[in-house]
Amino acid sequence: MPRFGLLAARLVGALPDLHRVGPYWRVLRAIRRRTLQLAGVSVGNLATIHERVHIDRRVAVTIGDRVDIRDRVRIGIAESGDRAGRLDIGAGTVILSDTQIDCSAWVRVGSGTHVGRRAQIFTHSHDTSRRDVPVLDAPITVAPVTIGDDVMVYNDVVILPGVTIGNGAVVAIRSVVTRDVAPYAIVAGSPARVVGTRG
């Protein structure tokens, strides 16, 4: 991602959102889309990027049409090194405020999906299984995360590396998703377990 374009996108991203001032809000949304495009981000039509959204320059990002990314969402790589990541967000998806998306591996979020406030999506972990390796030196492992279409992820959910959440699934508030979730399943708890299905 070009450094100058990313700097311009961050400066524009710091401008205050004044939703009730219609002309200002329309122009600001258009400027944010354009500066992100200049920085190498693929941004669809009518996508809305709110205040202080942070995108790491090492992550290739594709944002679909009508996507809504709210305040202070962080898209990055949570571990050091030269790793490059990727994030694809499908059309009409909403990602609410203070969500963190670790793109150490590929993250795919489908269309028409809701990701709640303060959700955390991880694609990396530390292999702490060996006693002869200090935890601070534990090797990093990565695995992609896929969230399907029409998925509801409620607030404060944690999704761990390698997880696939099927189309139409629902993940209850404050759940920790450690394994795959079947399409249309409703899961809850830590670790998340099936508690029902969408009718």
Image (tube, grey):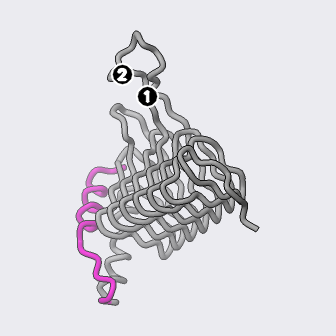
Q: Secondary structure at mark 2?
A: helix
Which sits earlier in the primary sequence, circle 1 or circle 2? 1
Residue 22 position, x and y percent, is: 34, 89
Q: Quick one: quadrant of the C terminus?
A: bottom right
Residue highlighted by disc 1: 126
Please tell me which residue lies in front, 1 or 161. Answer: 161
Bounds of the magenta span? 1-21
Seen in the image, is 36 located left or right of residue 121? left
Q: Residue at x 45, y 39 (%)?
A: 104
> Measured along the vertical axis of the image, is residue 146 above or below residue 21?
above
Q: Residue at x 60, y 68 (%)?
A: 112
Inter-mark Cα distance, 1 to 2:
8 Å
Contact, mark 1 vs mark 2 (Cβ under 8 Å): yes
Instruction: Tell me where residue 53 sits by quadrant.
Output: bottom left
Residue 48, magenta (yes or no): no
- Three-letter amino acid code of the residue under disc 1: His
Q: Residues within 10 Å of mark 1 (few under 14, many from 20)?
A: few
Q: Residue at x 36, y 22 (%)?
A: 135
Disc assigned to residue 194? none
Instruction: Tell me where residue 149 sits by quadrant.
Output: bottom right
Q: Residue at x 33, y 81 (%)?
A: 27
Residue highlighted by disc 2: 135
> Measured along the vertical axis of the image, is residue 82 above or below residue 121?
above
Residue that sits furthest to the top in the current view: 132
- Three-letter amino acid code of the residue under disc 2: Val
Residue 13, magenta (yes or no): yes
> Measured along the vertical axis of the image, is residue 164 above or below residue 141?
below
Residue 189 position, x and y percent, is: 55, 50
Seen in the image, is 84 located left or right of residue 180? left
